[in-house]
């Protein structure tokens, strides 16, 4: 225990040095070229009993059923690259997939997906029957790990940005309610594991996301006249009050802060939800087009209460990798949906999922108490 505390102290000192360096980093030089590819989405073919790439001819005539409410889930599922003997991946993955099924979500964005997790997910009948997915059995974009999107609505296009071998962002284009929706699934650079200049890296990653969505939206509106929306979800790897917040787009609504706006205090874990997983999701509804536009993402002086999806005090899996032992709101959902004649999306509710420990029904004790992941969804 003493050695662990010393290691954490040393990592904290290193991180403080990096943070000071990051705060001095100019925020204007965001011109680095990021490689981008456009892989095909996949859909289960029951006749061939296999996942097949989706092309434009397969989508011809396919129309998504209009929805006035959708459920969106974001979850970092914890890769098995470290602490393999303690994190119980073969136990957690089935529990995670059951949890995701229970949410009955329309859109699911996952981070730290490995080939192992993807293989297990693609074998699930409920995924085969209901979802388009951003990656197929080849698992090209999740080696060694990456992001995965599951959507009940047709995925018409994907942009995959690869910052490095370890860091990617998936931006999927969906057709929904005669509008076009962009869903970036993100996993921004973290402060640990020897990363340097993290503030600039996260600024660059956010810059690419916002620019990509803006450029695609402009082109779609020019060609089709359709209104566009965007839901950015994932592991942002910074908490409330972090300097990275200066790079957040003011027109994107931070759903947790917006729906918990009456709370003005520093982050705590006192209001962690323990409701059932079928109700712990983020939902959006279409109001009439006369409703007011969305509000800025970070109200002045506002800090969230609860919403700490990375909580080393409650979750032993988080404690294994935590640098500071401070609970933080890493995982977020941002919404941008301008009013139009076809209506617009508005945040209705948001809750955390996966906050309850797993039950060990065997005679063999676990090294640590397991949760579905080191993050809550």
Image (cartoon, rainbow, N blue to C red):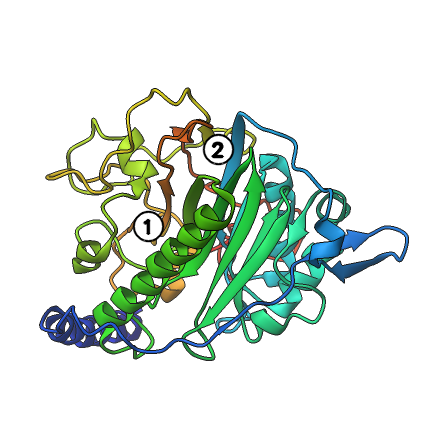
From the viewer's side, name the closer residue of 342 and 354: 342
Which mark is first along the chain, 2 or 1? 2
Vertical arrangement, residue 78 with respect to residue 29, above or below: above
Left or right of residue 31, residue 353 in this image: right
Q: Name the disc covering residue 262, or none.
A: none
Tell me the residue that label 1 is attached to: 313
Tell me the residue that label 2 is attached to: 280
- Near mark 2 (Cα within 10 A), the count class, few <14, some 14-19 or many ≥20, is many
Quarter of the image where the N terminus is located: bottom left
On the image, which quarter does residue 152 sit in? Answer: top right
Vertical arrangement, residue 168 with respect to residue 363, above or below: below
Q: Position of residue 232 (x, y in %)?
A: 40, 49
Q: How much space separates mark 1 and mark 2, taking CA atoms?
A: 21 Å
Vertical arrangement, residue 105 with respect to residue 149, above or below: above
The answer to whether residue 238 of the structure is visible from this angle is yes
User: At numbered mark 1, what does the secondary structure look like: helix, strand or loop?
Assistant: loop
- Near mark 1 (Cα within 10 A), the count class, few <14, some 14-19 or many ≥20, is few
Q: Position of residue 256 (x, y in %)?
A: 32, 37
On the image, which quarter does residue 175 sit in? Answer: top right
Q: Position of residue 226 (x, y in %)?
A: 48, 40
From the viewer's side, name the closer residue of 223 and 98: 223
**Residue located at (61% from left, 35% from top):** 104
The answer to whether residue 372 of the structure is visible from this angle is no
User: At numbered mark 2, what does the secondary structure look like: helix, strand or loop?
Assistant: loop
**Residue located at (77% from left, 46% from top):** 125
From the viewer's side, name the closer residue of 6 and 333: 333
On the image, which quarter does residue 205 sit in? Answer: bottom left
Left or right of residue 3, residue 229 in this image: right
């Amino acid at each position: 225990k003493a050695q662990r505390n010393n290691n954490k102290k040393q990592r904290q000192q290193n991180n403080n040095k990096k943070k000071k360096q990051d705060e001095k980093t100019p925020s204007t030089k965001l011109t680095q070229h990021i490689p981008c590819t456009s892989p095909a989405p996949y859909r289960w073919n029951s006749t061939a009993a296999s996942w097949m790439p989706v092309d434009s001819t397969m989508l011809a005539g396919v129309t998504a059923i209009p929805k006035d409410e959708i459920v969106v889930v974001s979850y970092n599922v914890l890769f098995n690259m470290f602490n393999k003997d303690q994190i119980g991946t073969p136990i957690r993955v089935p529990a995670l997939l059951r949890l995701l099924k229970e949410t009955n979500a329309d859109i699911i964005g996952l981070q730290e997906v490995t080939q192992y997790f993807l293989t297990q997910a693609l074998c699930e009948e409920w995924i085969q029957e209901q979802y388009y997915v951003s990656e197929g059995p080849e698992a090209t974009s999740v080696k060694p790990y990456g992001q995965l999107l599951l959507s009940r609505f047709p995925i018409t296009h994907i942009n995959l940005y690869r910052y490095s071998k370890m860091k990617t962002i998936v931006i999927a284009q969906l057709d929904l309610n005669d509008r076009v929706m962009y869903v970036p699934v993100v996993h921004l650079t973290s402060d640990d594991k020897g990363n340097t200049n993290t503030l600039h890296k996260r600024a660059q990653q956010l810059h690419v996301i916002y620019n990509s969505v803006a450029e695609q939206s402009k082109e779609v509106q020019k060609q089709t006249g359709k209104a566009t929306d965007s839901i950015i979800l994932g592991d942002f790897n910074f908490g409330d009050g972090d300097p990275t917040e200066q790079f957040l787009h003011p027109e994107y609504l931070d759903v947790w802060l917006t729906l918990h706006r009456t709370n003005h205090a520093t982050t705590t874990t006192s209001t962690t939800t323990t409701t059932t997983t079928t109700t712990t999701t983020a939902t959006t509804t279409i109001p009439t087009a006369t409703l007011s536009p969305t509000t800025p993402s970070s109200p002045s002086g506002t800090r969230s209460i609860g919403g700490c999806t990375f909580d080393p005090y409650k979750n032993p899996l988080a404690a294994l990798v935590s640098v500071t032992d401070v609970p933080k709101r890493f995982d977020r959902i941002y919404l941008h949906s301008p009013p139009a004649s076809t209506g617009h999306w508005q945040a209705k509710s948001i809750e955390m999922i996966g906050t309850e420990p797993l039950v060990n029904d065997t005679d063999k004790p676990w090294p640590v108490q397991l949760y579905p992941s080191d993050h809550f969804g």
